[in-house]
Image (cartoon, rainbow, N blue to C red):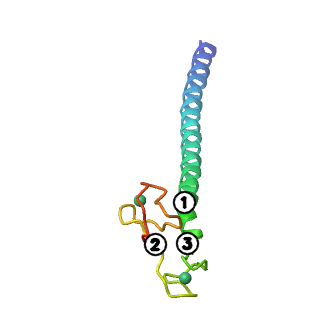
Amino acid sequence: MLNKINQKLNQLNRASQNVNNTSRNVQNMQRNIGSIGNRNNNNRNNRNNQAAAQPEADPSWKCACGMVNTSKFCGECGGKPIMCADCNIIVETKFCPECGTAVGQND
Ligand SMILES: [Zn+2]
Ligand SMILES: [Zn+2]
């Protein structure tokens, strides 16, 4: 009689241990999923930062006099970079590469 009760108690203990293990596994899985998501987000952020930083890394422009400048005005003749009024970008060629508008002096 006592043996049978002990056997049942053992079974119950084993069953509750299994439940504990299962919930622990679920927690571990959630932690794993969370860390994977964080890693992906970090990668995406890094890529975005690099892409956003690139245009600022090389602000140089070529003046009409041939001088390449990184400042607002030409260090050689004091001229300003030729901007496309529509696109608000520095245009070193006769036509804006973005919209094709002729920029600069008419000669
Ligand atoms: Zn110049
Ligand atoms: Zn333009």
The spot of residue 44 in percent (x, y) is 55, 50
Cβ atoms under marks 2 and 1 closer than 8 Å: no
Q: Secondary structure at mark 2?
A: loop
Q: Secondary structure at mark 3?
A: loop
Vertical position of residue 5 compared to residue 43: above or below: above
Most extreme residue toward the front, as rendered? Answer: 107
Q: CA distance from mark 2 to mark 1?
A: 28 Å
Instruction: Residue type at mark 2: give it.
Output: Ile
Q: Residues within 10 Å of mark 3 (few under 14, many from 20)?
A: few
Q: CA distance from mark 3 to mark 1?
A: 17 Å
What is the number of the mark on residue 59?
A: 3
Vertical position of residue 66 compared to residue 31: above or below: below
- Quarter containing ligand 2? bottom left
- Does residue 65 appear to the left or right of 105 in the view shown? right
- Nearest the viewer among 23 and 7 is 23
Mark 3 or 2: in front is 2
What is the number of the mark on residue 58?
A: none
- Nearest the viewer among 64 and 86 is 64
Instruction: Pick whichever of labels 3 and 2 is earlier in the sequence.
Output: 3
- Residue at mark 2: 82
* Residue found 59% across the figure and 43% down from its top: 36
- Nearest the viewer among 14 and 9 is 14
Which quarter of the figure is the N terminus placed in? Answer: top right
Mark 3 or 1: in front is 3
- Residue at mark 1: 49
Q: Secondary structure at mark 1?
A: helix
Count of number-bearing discs: 3
Mark 1 close to ligand 2, CB under 8 Å: no
Instruction: Pick whichever of labels 2 and 1 is earlier in the sequence.
Output: 1
